[in-house]
Amino acid sequence: MVNSISIFPGSFDPFTIGHYDIVERGLTLFDEIIIGIGINSEKQGSLPAAERKAQIERYFRDEPRVKVAIYDGLTVDFAHQVGATFILRGVRMVADFEYERNIAEANKELGGIETILLYTRPEYAHISSTLVRDLISHKVDVSRYLPKTK
């Protein structure tokens, strides 16, 4: 691929080691990955999007091929705005695959954007942002589920 740019969209509330692993592995496929923090009016994040963005930027501060942006609206529109030709997504389980397949088809139909799915490594398959938020609400140390800041 010549100068391939992918977006990795999500709410990333919080950004977990599973997300980090997908980006790291995605860098073997793409020249640049833009992590897109989507604003979803139906979801109230535990952290403001700007704080999530700053945290993710710290995780990748030594990797110039990773950028982080906040967007509102359709993911395919965001992809076009940043010049991406692919959407990168992670799949943890069968239910994720069904959901992601439908979204991928819609994104292809609406914007001509291909979606690349990477399967989560087995050791991260049980980790979700929802799980981590729940543990945080019960004052459990979640550092093992979050990337290490470089």
Image (cartoon, helix red, strand yellow):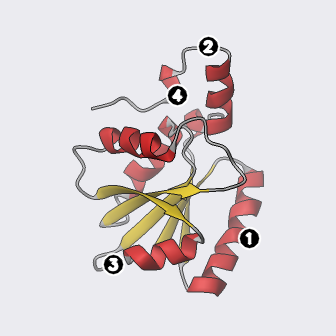
Tell me, for residue 102, which label it has, or none. 1
Asked if residue 84 can be seen in this view, the reply is no
Whole-number angstrom distance, CA of label 3 to CA of label 1: 25 Å
Q: CA distance from mark 2 to mark 3?
A: 45 Å
Query: Foreground residue, 31 or 73?
Result: 73
Q: Nearer the viewer, mark 3 or mark 1?
A: 1
Q: CA distance from mark 1 to mark 4?
A: 28 Å
| Lower position in the chain sequence, tag 3 or tag 1 | 3
- Cα–Cα gap, marks 3 and 4: 33 Å
Q: Earlier in the sequence, mark 2 or mark 4?
A: 2
Residue that badge 2 annotates = 139
| Mark 3 closeness class: few <14, some 14–19, many ≥20 residues within 10 Å | few
Q: What residue does disc 4 label?
A: 145
Q: In terms of secondary structure, where does tag 4 sit?
A: helix
> At 57% from the left edge and 46% from the top edge, which residue is drawn?
120
Task: Look at the numbered discs 3 and 4 and tell me whether their residues touch, using CB distance below 8 Å.
Answer: no
Residue 6's place in the image compared with 118, above or below, is below
Q: CA gap, disc 2 to disc 4?
A: 14 Å
**Which residue is at a point 50% across and 62% down the rendered structure image?**
71
